[in-house]
């Protein structure tokens, strides 16, 4: 009878740890998606990548494509007149890179990697 409360407490601790890690990983992924949406919106405001004039919002893109478009935009004379938005876009890209790094690093640390494999989290 003495081991039952110990096993119940240990099981509760493991369950709460799994839930906490899962929630934390979901929040980081959501932050990454929000950052990509903001990057897409800024690129749309700067007129990058629009193929249709009636398109109101820029489609959400991945980070590598955003970096490539930003390098092209930086060299373009068309966006040289709006350095404030260009600096903001650069800041948002760096923020998204930091979020991606933190998420991937968290997935590789040992107790979190077990939970990530168990619940199907993958690298960004």
Image (cartoon, rainbow, N blue to C red):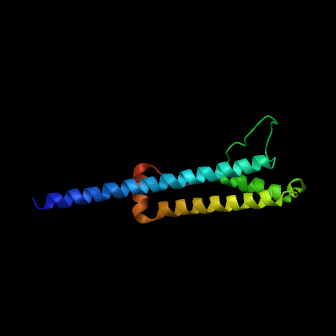
- Which residue is found at the position 68% from the left and 58% from the top? 92
Residue farthest along the left direction in this orientation: 1
Q: Answer yes or no: is residue 122 visible.
A: no
Q: Residue 101: percent from the left, percent from the top?
A: 58, 62
Q: Residue 119: percent from the left, percent from the top?
A: 42, 49
Asked whether, in this view, residue 41 is left or right of residue 100, the answer is: right
- Which residue is found at the position 80% from the left and 50% from the top? 46
Which quadrant is the N terminus positioned in?
bottom left
- Which residue is found at the position 61% from the left and 63% from the top? 98
Total numbered labels placed on residues in the image? 0
Closer-to-camera residue (91/117)? 91
Q: Residue 79: percent from the left, percent from the top?
A: 85, 55
- Which residue is found at the position 79% from the left and 42% from the top? 50
Residue 100 figure quarter: bottom right
Residue farthest along the right direction in this orientation: 77
Q: Residue 11: percent from the left, percent from the top?
A: 26, 56
Asked whether, in this view, residue 106 is left or right of residue 34, the answer is: left
Asked whether, in this view, residue 6 is left or right of residue 64, the answer is: left
Residue farthest along the top direction in this orientation: 54
């Amino acid at each position: 009878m003495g081991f039952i409360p110990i096993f119940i407490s240990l099981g509760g601790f493991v369950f709460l740890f799994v839930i906490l890690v899962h929630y934390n990983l979901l929040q980081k992924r959501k932050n990454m998606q929000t950052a990509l949406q903001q990057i897409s919106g800024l690129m749309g405001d700067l007129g990058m990548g629009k193929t249709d004039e009636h398109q109101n919002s820029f489609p959400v893109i991945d980070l590598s494509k955003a970096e490539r478009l930003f390098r092209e935009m930086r060299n373009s004379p068309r966006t040289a007149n709006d350095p404030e938005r260009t600096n903001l876009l650069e800041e948002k890209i760096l923020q998204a890179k930091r979020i991606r790094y933190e998420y991937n690093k968290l997935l590789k640390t040992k107790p979190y990697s077990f939970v990530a494999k168990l619940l199907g989290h993958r690298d960004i």
